[in-house]
Image (cartoon, grey):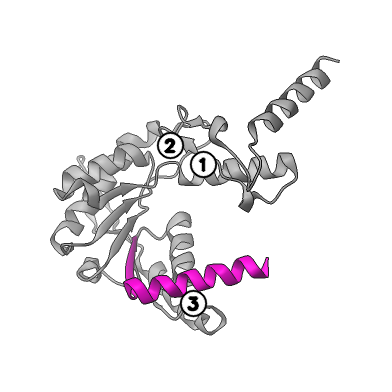
Amino acid sequence: MDKIRELGLKGAEKMAKVFGKKKVVVVGDGRVGSSAVFALFQQSWINEVGVIDVVLPGHKDENGEWVKGFNAMHNVEGDALDMNDGASFLNGNGRVEGCDYSICDDADAVVITSGAPQKPGQTRLELLGANASIVAGVCKQLKSHLNDHCVVIVVSNPCDVLAWVAYKTLGIDSKRVIGSGCVLDSSRLKQEIGDDLGIDYRSVNATIIGEHGDSEVAAYSASHSTKTYLLLHLFTQLIDSTIMETQ
């Protein structure tokens, strides 16, 4: 465990030397966004993490009723202070700053996590109606602050479709807009295979392909550990499990 951690730290240090320190801005300070900020804050190759959240001015609805505004930046500023206060306990040497979209002017990457959360029984595609307008609104505010090299990463669900929404709204090269896709799903698959076979999941190579949603596919035939292909093991366990259920 210590050796793996040591290798990871050396890799991060090498990355910082080759590419220099980077600045990343996270849009959306909910559960996913704040976790992303904390993870980035601990990386030695990150120099600064910016955080932006929703600011909605008060307005009248279609019936003329006043709708109270909402400013989530107060929470962002509190989170940034908490993380900076604990910086001495971490390996990174960056800073967290809550700000408006102007903080993106010199950012190397922007991570969009804004959107409504998935409810029990709800598919990711069912979030499209609400979250498409949210991501489009974020991108409209972001557009004038993007530099020529900044990469935009869309994590909001359904991320595959919303990456396309971001690309169309921003009007930049498609190579600079990336959806998080099945990265998390692939990590879950590695964990499940490791648990099922009693091996360290970090030694498992396995991938989920397709849409990040109900139609995704586990590429079991290409899954393997450090030296052993796992397909035979998985089928053996499946057969054993089926036999046990029919007894």
Q: Main secondary structure of the magenta part?
A: helix
Residue that lies at the very extreme toward the bottom in this rendered image: 88
Q: Residue at point 47% right, 32% down?
A: 122
Residue 96's tag is none
Q: Nearer the viewer, mark 3 or mark 1?
A: 1
Residue that lies at the very extreme toward the front in this rendered image: 227
> Residue 88 in the image: x percent, y percent?
53, 85
> Residue 70 in the image: x percent, y percent?
32, 59
Q: Earlier in the sequence, mark 3 or mark 1?
A: 3
Disc 2 designates what residue?
212
Q: Residue at point 30% right, 60% down?
A: 110
Comparing 193 with 14, the one in front is 14
Q: Label 1 amino acid?
A: Asp
Residue at disc 2, secondary structure: loop
Residue 185's tag is 1
Residue at disc 3, secondary structure: helix
Q: How far apart are labels 1 and 2 at the CA level? A: 8 Å
Residue that lies at the very extreme toward the right in this rendered image: 247
99 lies left or right of 120: left
> Residue 39 in the image: x percent, y percent?
48, 65
Disc 1 vs disc 2: Cβ atoms closer than 8 Å? yes
Q: How far apart are labels 3 and 1 at the CA level? A: 30 Å
Q: Earlier in the sequence, mark 1 or mark 2?
A: 1
In magenta, the rendered stretch is 1-26
Comparing 4 with 171, the one in front is 4
Q: Label 3 amino acid?
A: Asp
Q: Earlier in the sequence, mark 3 or mark 2?
A: 3
Disc 3 vs disc 1: Cβ atoms closer than 8 Å? no
Disc 3 designates what residue?
82
Q: Label 2 amino acid?
A: His
